[in-house]
Image (cartoon, helix red, strand yellow):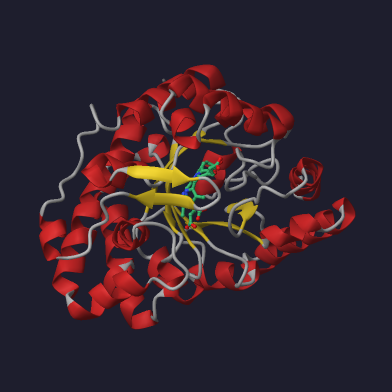
Amino acid sequence: MTETLKNDRLLRALRREPVDCTPVWLMRQAGRYLPEYRATRQRAGSFLAMAKNPELACEVTLQPLARFDLDAAILFSDILTVPDAMGLELYFVEGEGPKFRKPVRNAADIAKLAVPDMETELRYVTDAVRTIRRELAGSVPLIGFSGSPWTLACYMVEGGGSDNFPTIKALALNDPAALHRLLSVNTDAVIAYLSAQRAAGAQVLQVFDTWGGTLSPAMYREFSLPYLVRIARELPRGGGAERTPLILFGKGNAPYLEELAASGAEGIGVDWLVEMSEAARRTQGKVALQGNLDPAMLYGSPQAIADQARRTLDSYAQGNGGSRDGHIFNLGHGLSPDMDPEHVRALVDAVHEHSKR
Ligand code: 1CP
């Protein structure tokens, strides 16, 4: 488990140590924009069949690494595995995204929820982590992940994706105590889930707070931020150079960067609505920063993409006293199925090329 990594740029950047060039990985780097992913998914029959089979999950995790010079692998799974294991029964309708057969809508539903057993209900996830670590053989670090308590609650209460979250926002107003109980169980589950992934071999952990930015500031500070802070404080992750770093990614989290930087997390992931220079200035070297190219920039030409990558890299350095240290390059959110793999290559190569020390 503790073999030395051939490429430790990501871990060094998370400790804000010097690196030979800026590490880059991309949210949803394994996905439908890759023809080999679509082929594996076809063979598996469905997304869930793929995610629940450790060999197939490993295969798709490694696909983007075989093509591009990426500095990390991310476990192929989904944030919704946790509520599924809590008994909400996840399923997919072709073309409609994830849904739950048994959403939780009121205090009585919420009272029945408990932290799922990692050894049984979520064994397929830790098995996938072990399989991927073995196959990576120390080439790059493996990132494990979870949804944030708030983002998981959004899907659990709405019963699937949503545009404006009517059911959970009504619950926040009409029965805030019930919502806090849900967020508290989710927080315990996230801590147990990330701990299990770490024990199985995940070397970096990321929490996706995809929907925190849909909350007003007062509600973000009541329903999302305190639970992120609890994870950052309570998640056991070792000490010294062996510490497993935690990244808190949030869409729309720019208003809260000072608070997130004080949470105890090692890294903060930001979307493209904030300049990297501003994010670096406001976090004052307390954390590493991950981001933040607008994913839509990948629809530009390879030359335009390289220019934009350079812009993002230089913006970070400008706000970080002229140094590129402590930056992890990523998109501000995930890749989309209609993106061109050759444009992804242009991005990854431009990041390394332009950030050479
Ligand atoms: O093949 C398919 O049709 C399924 C599409 C798909 C994929 C490729 C889903 C369903 N999940 C995934 C993988 C996934 N999901 C990863 C893999 C690792 C990677 O390469 O990055 C990760 C990290 C996630 C996390 C996830 N799932 C998030 C947080 C990150 C984000 O994108 O904001 C969220 C919100 C989900 C929910 C989800 N799962 C799948 C879909 C289509 C959605 C979004 C649904 C919606 O809100 O409308």
- 15 w.r.t. 292: above or below: above
Residue 184 percent location from the top left of the image:
19, 58
Say which residue appears at 44% left-offset and 23% top-offset: 54
Residue 63 percent location from the top left of the image:
64, 29
Q: Quadrant of residue 182?
A: bottom left
Q: Is residue 333 left or right of residue 182?
A: right
Q: Quadrant of residue 305?
A: bottom right
The answer to whether residue 340 is seen in the rendering is yes
Say which residue appears at 54% left-offset and 50% top-offset: 16
Q: Quadrant of residue 298?
A: bottom right
Q: Is residue 205 left or right of residue 5?
A: left
Residue 237 percent location from the top left of the image:
32, 40
Say which residue appears at 28% left-offset and 61% top-offset: 227
- 93 w.r.t. 72: above or below: below
Quadrant, the N terminus: top left
Say which residue appears at 39% left-offset and 55% top-offset: 265
